[in-house]
Image: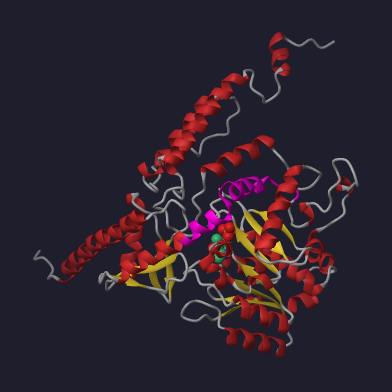
Amino acid sequence: MKVLSEAQAQTEASETLDPKNWDDIRALGHRMLDDMIDYVANIRDRPVWQPIPDEVRARFRVALPHRPSDLRDVYREFSEFVIPYATGNVHPGFMGWVHGGGTAVGMLAEMLAAGLNANLGGRDHIPIEVERQIVEWMRQIFGFPQGASGIFVTGTSMANLIAVLVARTTALGTSVRRRGVSEDGALLTAYTSTAAHGCISKAMDIAGFGSDALRCIEVDRCHRIELAALRERIALDRGAGRKPFLVVGSAGTVDIGAIDDLHAMSELCRQEKLWFHVDGAFGALGILAPALKSRLAGIENADSIALDFHKWGQVPYDAGLLLVRDGDRHRDTFAAPAAYLRRESRGLAANSPWPCDLGPELSRGFRALKTWFTLKTYGTEKLGAVITRSCALAGYLQARILAEPRLELMAPVQLNIVCFRYRAENANQLNGEIVLDIQESGIAAPSTTLLDGQLAIRAAIVNHRTDFSDIDALLSAVLEFGSRRSSDHRLVLQLEQSPPLAM
Ligand SMILES: *Cc1c(COP(=O)(O)O)cnc(C)c1O
């Protein structure tokens, strides 16, 4: 008979991951909560972002721990070496790319979701109903019919990919799921504008069509798709024996915030019998702002809409959503029988269809909860007011740029994104450096984009904490670093032009 030593017996008896003493973890948990609430409340006291010292980075390249450590020590490491080196999008000075600011409400909901540890792949539990509730609310907001379906995903990149797949199954029939996109599938072509997000081209690649099967149609000076050119290209492709199947419109382009003429696009798609998908990553929620609602007219005619709650919706990362007008098409694309996923009419395996019938994932977290908390706590009017204000701030930034001779506006401001630059001879290089200088200073965090080969400083106002003073700080920083850099530059030129020193 095998006899366990006392030590062995003790270890085996405690082979659970629960703490021996719940009061210890409770006390530490309360402290973490206080610390994170302080972090969010006092975010202005911190730099927006700061460069990561080599020794800090090196701390995250160590060996896998085999032995336990005290949670306090792990938390201390988090506090000292993770918190200070985050992206900075919680900070009101963050205007780079298109990032949401998050809220304390969303943070708390995320903690509750983790405690519940719900798996939203399927089965009969209320977390699924919470997700369906959000889908239903979005269905109503976007004017989709009963029978529409939707699913939470990481973000719009994934939502766009799923939309391409649903459009594909609609075009080719469900047999494509067995046969792949060979033969007929190889002839399919999709359409979007040159200003559309790169993830659409990636979705075409991943879906097996190849990114060449996506035709990128020219845009007008406001970066809206040229409808005549779109119509022409579709006709040209049809003439050449190709099979157009999908048009993707943008509700808020990522570069300058343009909204395509969604109404006209939906009409064109109806006439041409094409799937009309709208990438509304950040812009679709503009529907909550009374002033923007009419700009999105036509979105209600889309076959599918992708949007992110983690951008203008201020829900903490990540929370994307795909909405599909015809739920049957959506299910036809993903539902698959499996003995171990058998549905019942009662018990825990009831409540079909499950979210796993609407996308590629089986295990899924409870993203819907933080979104539910956000929508309920603030209400759509307040969230809409935050969106309206982002646009007002962008308007203020635009007005200040137009009033400042040293600055140049690079694109019409249509929503919440402002592209501009410091005037100079070597403007591309100089403005690139200005942006890096500002990021490293911790004052603000703009990003850059290229518009017709010209590098622009891009300020996307998404964070609900951003205020007029943050816009002023950004502008002062651009002018300050711009003048410093250009005098450095003049100095370099002078040195280059002066005669070589006598040897
Ligand atoms: C952010 C964005 C995406 C990508 O969405 P993720 O949530 O980052 O995956 C796609 N399209 C547009 C217009 C975006 O702004």
Horizontally, residue 268 falls left or right of residue 394, namely right
Residue 151 in view, yes or no:
no
Q: Nearer the viewer, residue 391 or 462?
A: 391
Q: Position of residue 226 (x, y in %)?
A: 55, 83
Q: Position of residue 87 (x, y in %)?
A: 46, 49
User: In the figure, residue 411 lies in which quadrant?
Assistant: bottom left
- Give the color scheme: rainbow, by chain, secondary structure or one colour: secondary structure
User: In the figure, residue 347 lies in which quadrant?
Assistant: top right
Q: Nearer the viewer, residue 262 or 163?
A: 262
Residue 28 in view, yes or no:
yes
**In the rendered view of the protein, which quadrant contains the C terminus?**
bottom left
Q: Position of residue 48 (x, y in %)?
A: 39, 48
User: In the figure, residue 313 lies in which quadrant?
Assistant: bottom right
Q: Position of residue 409 (x, y in %)?
A: 35, 72
Q: Which residues are magenta?
A: 362-388
Q: Nearer the viewer, residue 411 or 168?
A: 411
Horizontally, residue 96 falls left or right of residue 307, namely left
Give yes or no for residue 292 being in the magenta stretch: no
Image height of 439 relative to 76, above or below: below
Q: Residue at point 65% right, 62% down?
A: 141
Q: Residue at point 83% right, 71% down?
A: 173
